[in-house]
Amino acid sequence: MTSPVLPLLRDGGPLLAAFEGVRALLEPVFPTSLFRYEHVQPRMSPARWAEIARVAPTIGMSLADWNSNTLSGTDYRGDVSIPVFLVVRQDKPEFLLKGTKTPGVMGMMAVAIFALDSQRIEGLGQVSVKRASNLEAANWIDDRTAIATLNVVVKNVGYSKELARAQLADLSNVDGTWDFAPVTTAQSSGAEK
């Protein structure tokens, strides 16, 4: 059996493969025709969260960390943490938990855990849902929105140093995929909105 080809290191390598693998496990139960998918950045402002939560149901995904584990030998291996955010909206706050004709946060949490926990991403590792919570966003979203957070971990993800070395020439030339021109963005505290 051959291992699947991972994305190039410059594109994220095993991190991108883990991220896309988690999304691929979610899409059959949360199809893109009915659920919007968003990339969620660390430390987003409440205003940005409010913007994402305007359209629900939404699945947000991020990359938290890649922690080395004791199984590391000559190649870097560790658990990749991919937070998954399940956003629901209802007309009345009392419908947020169970839902109505649209999903509630309990149903979305249960379905996401079923779709992810103990699954395998071929060539990478086993998926584990370490925690599911409906509490993190409670203080800064409106009372008709709920955001459940799942701490999803893809275990023992690594890469071969031999494959990485083969890509070093490509990393030094960058092959036209990276642009190092300065990027200017307006900084926002989120208080403007």
Image (tube, rainbow, N blue to C red):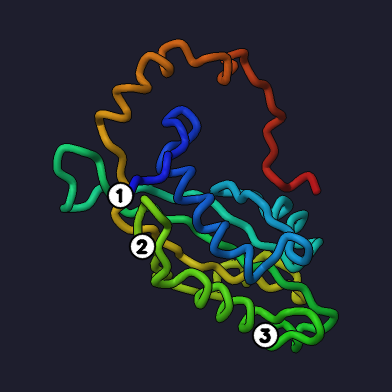
Residue 189 drawn at (x, y percent): 67, 42
Q: Residue at x 45, y 31 (%)?
A: 8
Q: Quadrant of residue 149?
A: bottom right
Q: Quadrant of residue 61?
A: bottom right
Residue found at the far front of this picture: 1
| Spatial separation of the CA atoms under disc 2 and disc 3 | 29 Å
Which label is found at residue 97? 3
Label 3 SS: loop
Q: Which residue is mark 2?
A: 126
Which amino acid, mark 2?
Answer: Gln
Q: Nearer the viewer, mark 1 or mark 2?
A: 2
| Spatial separation of the CA atoms under disc 1 and disc 2 | 15 Å
> Is 50 placed above or below 188 here?
below
Q: Are marks 1 and 2 in contact (CB under 8 Å)?
A: no
Labels 2 and 3: the sequence-earlier one: 3
Which amino acid, mark 1?
Answer: Asn
Residue 105 left/right relative to 7? right
> Is 13 placed above or below 1 here?
above
Which label is found at residue 161? none
Viewer-nearest residue: 40 or 5: 5
Q: Which residue is mark 1?
A: 67
- Mark 2 surroundings: few (<14), some (14-19) or many (≥20) residues within 10 A: some
Q: Residue at x 77, y 66 (%)?
A: 34
Labels 1 and 3: the sequence-earlier one: 1
Label 2 SS: strand
Q: Quadrant of residue 93?
A: bottom right
Residue 10 drawn at (x, y percent): 46, 27
